Image: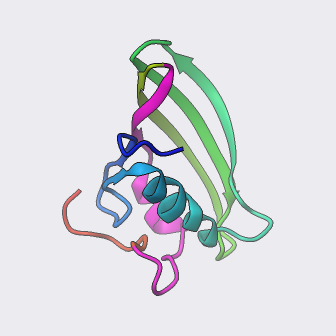
Amino acid sequence: MDNGRLSARRRGHLAISRTWRGGHEIFGDFLGRIGTCFAADGLPVITLTRVLGDGPPAAAEWTAVGTAANGEPYENHCLGVFTVEDGRITAVREYLDTDHVARTLPAWPAGAAPGLSPAAGG
């Protein structure tokens, strides 16, 4: 799936707040490991609530609701601004409540880089 042009940016001051490049980083390193922050029966359910535009710039709004590995309820409202080229998403800038992420989700396990602990910059 990855044509090295794919990128996803998450803003904020967490270690996950950076630009992830390529399918391996986005789907393997980030999405493949974020599940460890949630209870086995509490993986987030994503509900798409709005889509705006259908051209090169498009936006989508969604809600993610689940249960963190520590038992805390997790609900985050997110917005993604997408770049679409030749009918495929090539980039997304994702906006979400990173303070809620930091307070609710535990750090990723040792050896899983990067963790959810605060990072310098953003």
Between residue 94 and residue 69, name the one nearer to us.
94
* Residue at the spot 50% in from the left edge and 20% down from the top edge: 87
Q: Residue furthest left?
A: 121
Q: Which residues are magenta?
A: 87-113
**Point 62% across, 58% down: residue:** 74
Image quadrant for the C terminus?
bottom left
Residue 84 location, quadrant: top left
Q: Position of residue 89 (x, y in %)?
A: 47, 30
Where in the figure is residue 115, as x and y percent of width and height? 42, 74
Residue 91 belongs to magenta span: yes
Image quarter for residue 40?
bottom right
Identify which residue is drawn at 33% across, 57% down. Answer: 17
Reply above or below: 87 against 92: above
- Number of labelled discs? 0
Q: Is residue 96 magenta?
A: yes
Report the front residue among 97 and 35: 35
